[in-house]
Image (tube, helix red, strand yellow):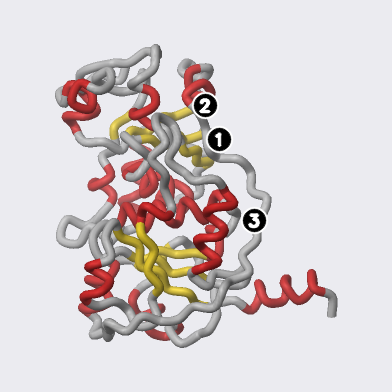
Amino acid sequence: MSPSLLAFTAALLAPQSADPLVSASWLAEHLNDPRVVVVQVDGRREPYAEGHIPGARFVALSEITVDGGPGVELPPAEELERTLRRLGISDDSHVVIYSAVSPLAAARLWMSLDVLGHADHASLLNGGLVAWRAQGGPVTTSVPVAEEGTLTHRTRAPFLVTADWIHQRLDDPNVLLIDARPDNEYTGADGGMGGRAHPGHIPGAYQVYWEKLVQSDNRSQLLPLDALRREFEAAGAAPGKAVVAYCMVGMRASLTYLVGRMLGYDMKFYDGSWHDWGTRDLPYVTGTARR
């Protein structure tokens, strides 16, 4: 059998889910499948060291982001690939992602996998570690040894957009901007990142604060699909429109992006977000009015 046919067959055999979410019960059933790679992503290693899902590998948020100034948050694709291979992720893996602290870190890793063309083989653990523990799932402090993966970059339709791309389309009715930030940032009451940027939001942007997409008692648990769709439709999302997610530095917008992809919208991602837009000579709006 040719290498390409082997890879295709392996991909077909890999455990799949219908959307970017899996439940704790699904993971319990598939935890020992060698093609399932569980990854915990957090800003610090301490939560992982205190107890994690058996077999879960740890990756620090700093390993999948870079602090290179406005508009630079994703590391180069080659660096992302090396990091993910180190975790044991291969082309036929089904990656299950969770965070012990915030669903935003997990969504950020899912979006990073989408950059490499692998998000269709990756899922968030809906409810995260809280849901896993609630159903009686075991935790351990044992650190697994992962063999190097064979992940390769797959071609994917580009979805990352820049400030210039958005600026040229501010009056385009087929482009919808969704701002994932809270009231004080959206309106500019925060002074624009504490005086480090212009205050407010991109003209025309709808505010859908990311916490409106999750359960109030467990922020790692997304709302039901119909409730999520209502939030997006209320902001103007519709078939045929490009929906651009942004926030301050691209963390909160990662969850917006994932949810929009799950709902089937043509999602775009502005990684630079307000940290980029608000520090450039570009139009902005303060207050609650969109424009």
Q: Disc 2 vs disc 1: Cβ atoms closer than 8 Å?
A: yes
- Whether residue 136 sits left or right of residue 152 in the image: it is left
Quadrant showing the N terminus: bottom right
Q: Nearer the viewer, residue 283 or 173?
A: 283
Task: Residue 174: give its label.
Answer: 2
Q: Is residue 68 above or below residue 118?
A: above
Q: Position of residue 194 (x, y in %)?
A: 18, 26
Q: Position of residue 9 (x, y in %)?
A: 72, 76
Q: Is residue 111 above or below residue 24?
A: above
Q: Secondary structure at mark 1?
A: loop
Q: Position of residue 135 (x, y in %)?
A: 24, 81
Q: Which residue was labeled with disc 3?
A: 153
Question: Could you tell me which residue is drawn at 54 percent across and 69 percent down?
Answer: 89
Mark 1 packing: few (<14 Cα in 10 Å), some, or many (20+)? few
Against 112, residue 58 (above or below) is: below
In the rendered structure, which amino acid carries the disc numbered 1?
Gly
Q: Amino acid type of disc 2?
A: Asn
Q: Nearer the viewer, mark 1 or mark 3?
A: 3
Q: Give x and y (percent) for residue 206.
A: 33, 29
Which residue is labeled 1 in the image? 240
Q: Nearer the viewer, mark 3 or mark 2?
A: 3
Between the C-alphas of marks 3 and 2, the distance is 30 Å
Measuring 40% from the left and 52% from the top, which residue is drawn there?
A: 108
